[in-house]
Image (cartoon, coloured by chain):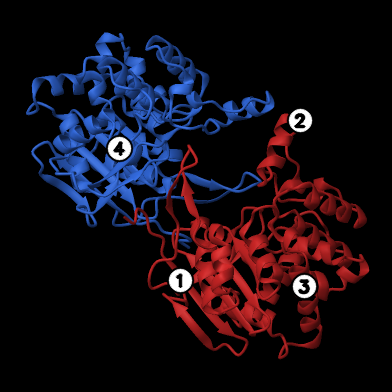
Chain colours: A red, B blue
């Protein structure tokens, strides 16, 4: 018996804006959340801040990440903050326990509260601070809609999605920055342009190639232990760059095929987003059948109960590709 | 902008089986999960086990609970286990960290692993062990479908739902016991019969009145700190007995109106179940408008981000009652 069902919309688009495949109403605006951190990192590179501050590929990957807050993540964020003359107190992202359970439990055992560097968005925020520093803008308030840091990102989003977003609804993301409503198909287009930036201005195309390299080279920094993004990217070896966002949003960039993917689970469930994405990656053949079966715990995971018994599974519905 | 949407089905039924109101396909079978712990507790009373073991109203409430694992819950479960000659090792429900965050963190800080008594279902399981003990049945394997404990419950479910469940699909619940697929409207009927048991055999009606009393008298034991069930029952002062289950199932018993309510969120989201139930309680007028507004954090809670800012809300959709 199927106990629960998630519904979703998805689009696969090429860099010319052709919709290669779609499921559901792909023109529906969605808050892209953390699935577009790669786009939000473009000004960090384009502005010259990344060069001026000697930003490494690891740091650039963290700017694109929703990390687990493991020491491997937080150590890098801390040293990057230090190098740009900032401290964790400058991060306006708030705090939460690290997503990585072992790290969270270690903090609790030590009687320590999590800091802003543990916030899964601390890399993105450090990138924003670096840009503000480099441009000589005030760092305080860099998360506000009208701050140059956010306005610059809005401009990038408009160009990459080919949408006038000046009147688009926007909300405040979990980490405090604006999140803009973008039609899902336009989000997939932006991902396709990351995959194939050749028609973009040189400076933007160069920034994208650098971001893509960092994203693909350091999958562990994008998420961390056990996360879908990290494990799937490691498994398919750079054939897709993947990023989850809150509320069931997920994006992927397929450089070899020049395609972008965006999907949104209607009810916002993250448990469905990865499984839906895995099925789309299989559809695009970047995930082979044998690799999909090896990654069963990501592509159609068993549900185990409190006594460790497998009692069901989460799987793509018939009608969803594959 | 509405970012995410949950869909649900619901039925409000009276003890004669009249469907007073419904939303969606209310004949759809659902796994009732923990929403029917009150029904599962009937054999504990009917068998004479509750009398033989001097089971208190507090213990009976715990048999109907999905508790937070706070010391108030676990102390009672432990002493009850002891009184029936069992130990936590006899509980076959498995373990998980207490749902109550402060209790969970205290365990982690102390370097202790959670025990079976912390499992939110430990009260229900202790009730099952008590019944097996009283009937002279083996306690080992009491969670198995073919064990007399579970077969007795199956019989109760058939009678209370007026359904032949002999061929109904069944799954294994999080705590290891069978969970049976029951049409949602029939689940609401069973709740209505709890509300108004006058047409049931005397012995069953008496058991139900006793269970209802325990359920209504000890809302804190049904859930615990901050839970929907506990807070809503405390707020409406026994006018509805409420119980959540996994995967977005929720049931309510309205004794004064003789009505039963059952609902299932299609995608299994618990964040939607309470909000949907609150709207139905408002529809039935057991939740007044002013009380609903006082309980805003249960009935249409704000979504706050990592910096503590209110950035949205979860609320009933238009078309859902109210």
Circle 1 packing at 10 Å, graded few (<14), some (14-19), many (20+), is many
Can residue A169 be seen at all in this image of the molecule? no
Q: Name the subunit of mark 4.
A: B
Q: CA distance from mark 4 to mark 2?
A: 44 Å
Q: Residues within 10 Å of mark 3 (few under 14, many from 20)?
A: many
Disc number placed over residue A110 in the picture, else none:
2
Task: State the CA–CA distance, disc 3 to disc 4.
Answer: 55 Å
**Sequence-earlier tag: 3 or 2:** 2
**Label 1 – label 2 distance at C-alpha:** 43 Å
The residue indicated by pointer 3 is: A211
Residue located beneath label 1 in the image: A9
Q: Residue beneath label 4, please?
A: B145
Name the side, left or right, on which B110 lies relative to A270.
right
* Residue B78 x %, y %: 46, 16
Spatial separation of the CA atoms under disc 3 and disc 1 = 27 Å
Query: Looking at the rendered structure, which numbered label has been put on residue B66?
Result: none
Q: Quadrant of residue A41?
A: bottom right
Total count of labels = 4
Residue A110 on image: x %, y %: 76, 30
């Amino acid at each position: 018996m199927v106990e629960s069902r998630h519904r979703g919309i998805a689009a696969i688009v090429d860099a010319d804006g052709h919709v290669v495949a779609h499921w559901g109403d792909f023109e529906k605006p969605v808050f892209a959340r953390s699935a577009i951190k790669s786009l939000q990192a473009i000004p960090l590179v384009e502005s010259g801040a990344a060069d001026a501050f000697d930003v490494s590929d690891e740091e650039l990957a963290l700017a694109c990440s929703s990390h687990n807050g493991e020491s491997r993540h937080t150590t890098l964020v801390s040293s990057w903050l230090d190098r740009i003359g900032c401290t964790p107190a400058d991060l306006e992202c708030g705090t939460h326990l690290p997503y990585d359970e072992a790290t969270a439990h270690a903090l609790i055992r030590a009687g320590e509260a999590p800091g802003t560097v543990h916030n899964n968005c601390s890399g993105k925020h450090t990138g924003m601070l670096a840009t503000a520093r480099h441009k000589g803008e005030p760092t305080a308030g860099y998360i506000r809609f009208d701050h140059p840091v956010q306005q610059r990102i809005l401009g990038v989003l408009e160009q990459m999605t080919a949408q006038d977003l000046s009147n688009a609804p926007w909300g405040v993301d979990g980490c405090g920055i604006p999140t803009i409503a973008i039609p899902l198909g336009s989000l997939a287009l932006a991902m396709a342009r990351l995959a194939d930036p050749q028609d973009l201005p040189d400076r933007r195309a160069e920034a994208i190639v650098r971001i893509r390299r960092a994203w693909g080279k350091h999958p562990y920094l994008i998420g961390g232990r056990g996360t879908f993004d990290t494990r799937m990217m490691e498994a398919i070896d750079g054939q897709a760059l993947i990023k989850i966002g809150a509320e069931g949003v997920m994006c992927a960039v397929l450089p070899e095929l020049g395609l972008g993917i965006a999907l949104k689970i209607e009810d916002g469930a993250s448990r469905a987003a990865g499984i839906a994405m895995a099925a789309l990656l299989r559809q695009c053949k970047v995930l082979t059948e044998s690799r999909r079966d090896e990654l069963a715990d990501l592509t159609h995971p068993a549900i185990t109960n409190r006594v460790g018994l497998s009692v069901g599974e989460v799987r793509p519905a018939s009608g969803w590709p594959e």
